[in-house]
Image (tube, rainbow, N blue to C red):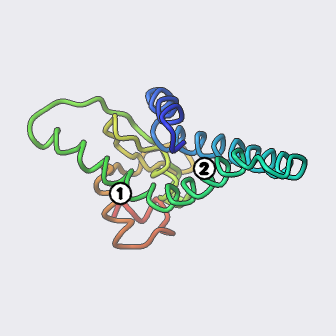
Amino acid sequence: MPLDGGRIIRAILTEQWGHVKAYNFMLKVTKVVAFMLAASGITLLWYTKFNFSLLLIGAFLIVNIIAEQRGSRYILINEIIKSRQKIYNGCAERAGIIAIHADEPARKALKLLSYNKYHLISVIDSNMNIIGTVTETQLIDRLAQKGIRTKAANILD
């Protein structure tokens, strides 16, 4: 993923799956490719005693994917906040609805947010009735205040 091809594929997938799901998929693909390249590089180095290029490429991908994982959550939230400035400035934006059961951790809704669509989060009960709705900004604020393990029902307060 740190290479251009991976970023292009992630951008295409983001349109259909949302940022988080596309990012997580590309993260898994990159890990598989990186470890395959590293294993091939070790095998090639073992037999040729000279050529270590695949090992270097695999190591490069592994190191970069670890660094990218660390900052990904902050980047996503920052992108969401930046894109919301358009709405505050009077522009229209596509919207979506996320439904989450009241007993589920509210952080599960974070995984469904994307920067190319504004979301309303509806909290539902066991009878599939909406007991309340919050905006994604309210969701992020309340998770920051109450903790990441907060149940969905508690973000309505």
State the residue lying farthest toward the left.
Answer: 89
Q: Is residue 85 left or right of residue 102?
A: left
**Along the line of sight, which residue is nearer the eye, 55 or 30?**
55
User: Is 143 above or below relative to 65?
Assistant: below
Residue, disc 2 = 61
Q: Residue furthest bottom?
A: 146
Q: Which percent across, then down, holds residue 87?
A: 17, 39
**Residue depth check, mark 2 versus mark 1: number of the one nearer the observer:** 2
Find disc 1 in the rendering and name its residue.
139
Residue at the spot x=79%, y=50% of the render?
50
Q: Residue furthest front?
A: 50
Q: Amino acid at mark 2?
A: Leu
Labels 2 and 1: the sequence-earlier one: 2
Q: Image height check: is 155 above or below 39?
A: below
Q: Position of residue 51 (x, y in %)?
A: 76, 46
Q: Position of residue 16 (x, y in %)?
A: 48, 26
